[in-house]
């Protein structure tokens, strides 16, 4: 396909898998994870139940796909923040923290998971507990890679500890916000600045 100069390229239509995962997030938010079935998912997307099974597989596989989809969205915010602050690591951490916390405010799946931790839908708890370690590891890898170009002045062991601290601090505020995202991000940046001084 030839694109004329100055013409906009239309975004690609979502794949069937993306449509099924998005419908899974919406259904989980509306009716709770315990009431999500492949049949309801198929009805939501407007396809057969077999199509849903072909695209996703089992309900646990749907949970994993939903979590990875949301993780990609959060890490995309982090990437943009670091790209916008190539010479200011603390500024990048503050912007990334704020972006993540703002996205978390309106995240349907996250709200469903958090309500599960408070007893609203105990079947959703495995979404959080089963994948928590791998999600934390994935976030640390992305942040660690983004920090590498900055001149931090810490050895690898201490830099890994600092990265772990920042990631866990942001995630704790994602799960249980205590203030406005901008104020929380400023506090996280203040802490990070002192830790990164070595």
Image (cartoon, helix red, strand yellow):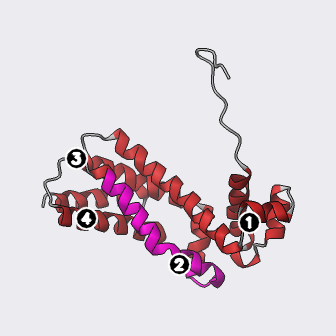
Q: Residues within 10 Å of mark 3 (few under 14, many from 20)?
A: few
Q: CA distance from mark 3 to mark 2?
A: 33 Å
Q: Which of the marked residues, 4 or 1, is nearer the chain's N terminus? A: 1
According to the picture, the residue beneath numbered tag 1 turns out to be: 27
Q: Closest to the observer: 190 or 69?
A: 69
Q: Is residue 184 above or below residue 59?
A: above
For the point 51% across and 73% down, the residue is 131
Q: Mark 1 falls on what kind of element?
A: helix
Which residue is tagged 2? Answer: 130
Q: CA distance from mark 2 to mark 4?
A: 23 Å
- Helix, strand or loop at label 3? It is loop
Q: Which of marks 4 and 2 precedes in the sequence?
A: 2
Marks 2 and 4: CB-CB under 8 Å? no
Q: Which mark is in front, 1 or 2?
A: 2
Q: Verify whether residue 140 appears in magenta.
A: yes
Find residue 141 and report its horizontal and vertical position in percent: 36, 59
Question: Is most of the magenta stretch helix, strand or loop?
Answer: helix
Separation (CA) of disc 4 from disc 3: 14 Å
Picture coordinates of residue 67, whole percent (x, y): 57, 65
State the CA–CA distance, disc 3 to disc 1.
42 Å
Q: Earlier in the sequence, mark 3 or mark 2?
A: 2
**Label 4 to label 1: alpha-carbon separation:** 38 Å
Q: Is residue 1 left or right of residue 84?
A: right
């Amino acid at each position: 396909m030839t694109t004329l100069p100055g013409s906009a390229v239309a975004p690609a239509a979502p794949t069937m898998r993306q449509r099924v995962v998005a419908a899974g997030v919406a259904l989980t938010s509306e009716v709770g994870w315990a009431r999500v079935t492949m049949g309801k998912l198929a009805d939501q997307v407007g396809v057969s139940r077999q199509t849903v099974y072909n695209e996703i597989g089992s309900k646990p596989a749907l949970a994993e796909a939903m979590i990875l989809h949301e993780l990609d969205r959060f890490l995309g915010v982090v990437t943009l923040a670091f790209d916008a602050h190539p010479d200011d690591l603390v500024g990048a951490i503050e912007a990334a923290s704020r972006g993540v916390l703002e996205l978390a405010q309106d995240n349907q799946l996250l709200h469903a998971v958090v309500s599960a931790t408070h007893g609203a839908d105990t079947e959703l708890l495995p979404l959080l507990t089963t994948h928590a370690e791998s999600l934390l590891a994935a976030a640390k890898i992305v942040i660690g890679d983004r920090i590498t170009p900055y001149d931090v002045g810490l050895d690898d062991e201490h830099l890994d500890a600092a990265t772990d601290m920042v990631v866990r601090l942001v995630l704790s505020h994602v799960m249980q916000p205590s203030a406005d995202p901008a104020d929380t991000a400023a506090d996280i940046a203040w802490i990070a600045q002192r830790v990164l001084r070595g």
